[in-house]
């Protein structure tokens, strides 16, 4: 899939920022940006989807060259880890604030959050609102998640902190609209962090080596990918509704 992908309505431009190719590909289809599809015209914003990489270690040029202006918002979208008991896999998370490890909180844009919450409720998709903790690494085990949950955050991701900083530096509102991949009691395969490149691509060589050396982990990763597809399908339905709304 070529990124950025452009489509959508006739209003101002909104940037969707996903970390990995897996997330970007599935969400692009949900909002009508898949290659070969012609997005239906509507009164909502133009939509640009870009892949920013895991943890946004190298901040992208935002907005990307050639994107129609004005750009009016940056939305961080994709998977996250659930921290609160009600943040089970498949639950859409609407961030009220982005929280760091030191307890600092930066409020997200309430209007985008309200739209997403209403869309999830109308679709019958579980949704939770609250602070999202930014972490520089994946939290793999329940003990790490319990410590993070003690901060009051309902979910954790690796991109919202840097994306918030980028948006603030450009004077743009930011919202994080995500969906839970792993709940507070779930363990992630320990090989997962090493399988993702900084640009969000899968390191195929390492994946093949994992299949040979530890097939049990490979099976766990396949199951996790299936859960991720289902979760991103739910988030995609919410985003499609939100992005069809005219923006004031």
Image: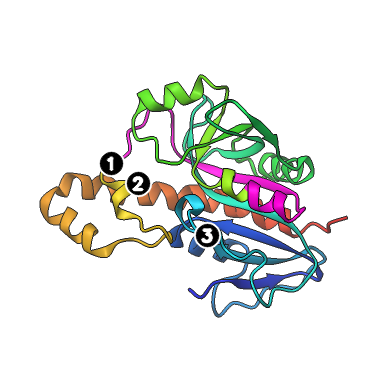
Magenta stretch: give its range. Answer: 164-189
Marks 3 and 2 close (CB-CB < 8 Å): no
Q: Residue furthest left?
A: 213
Q: Is residue 27 above or below residue 91?
A: below
Q: Position of residue 242 (x, y in %)?
A: 72, 53
Q: Position of residue 231 (x, y in %)?
A: 49, 47
Give the Cα separation between the discs numbered 3 and 2.
Answer: 22 Å
The reply to whether the magenta stretch includes residue 176 is: yes
Q: Is residue 150 above or below residue 61?
A: above
Instruction: Say which element carries label 1.
Output: loop
Q: Residue furthest top?
A: 150
Q: Which residue is mark 2?
A: 224
Mark 3 or mark 2, whichever is nearer to me? 3
Q: Residues within 10 Å of mark 3 (few under 14, many from 20)?
A: many
Q: Position of residue 93 (x, y in %)?
A: 60, 38
| Mark seen at residue 52 | 3
Q: Quadrant of residue 152?
A: top right
């Amino acid at each position: 899939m070529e990124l950025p992908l452009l489509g959508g309505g006739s209003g101002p431009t909104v940037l969707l920022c996903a970390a990995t190719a897996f997330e970007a590909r599935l969400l692009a289809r949900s909002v009508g940006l898949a290659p070969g599809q012609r997005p239906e015209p509507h009164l909502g914003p133009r939509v640009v989807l870009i892949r920013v990489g895991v943890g946004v270690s190298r901040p992208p040029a935002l907005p990307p060259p050639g994107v129609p202006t004005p750009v009016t918002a940056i939305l961080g979208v994709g998977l996250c880890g659930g921290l609160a008991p009600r943040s089970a896999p498949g639950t859409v998370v609407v961030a009220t604030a982005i929280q760091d490890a030191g307890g600092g909180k930066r409020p997200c844009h309430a209007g985008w959050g309200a739209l997403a919450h209403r869309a999830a409720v109308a679709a019958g998709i579980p949704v939770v609102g609250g602070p999202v903790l930014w972490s520089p690494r994946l939290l793999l085990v329940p003990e790490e998640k319990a410590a993070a949950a003690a901060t009051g955050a309902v979910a954790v991701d690796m991109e919202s902190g840097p994306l918030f900083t980028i948006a603030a530096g450009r004077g743009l509102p930011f919202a994080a609209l995500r969906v839970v991949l792993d709940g507070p009691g779930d363990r992630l395969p320990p090989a997962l962090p090493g399988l993702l490149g900084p640009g969000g691509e899968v390191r195929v060589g390492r994946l093949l080596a994992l299949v040979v050396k530890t097939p049990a982990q490979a099976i766990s990763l396949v199951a996790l990918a299936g859960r991720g597809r289902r979760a991103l399908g739910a988030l995609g339905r919410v985003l499609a509704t939100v992005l069809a709304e005219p923006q004031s």
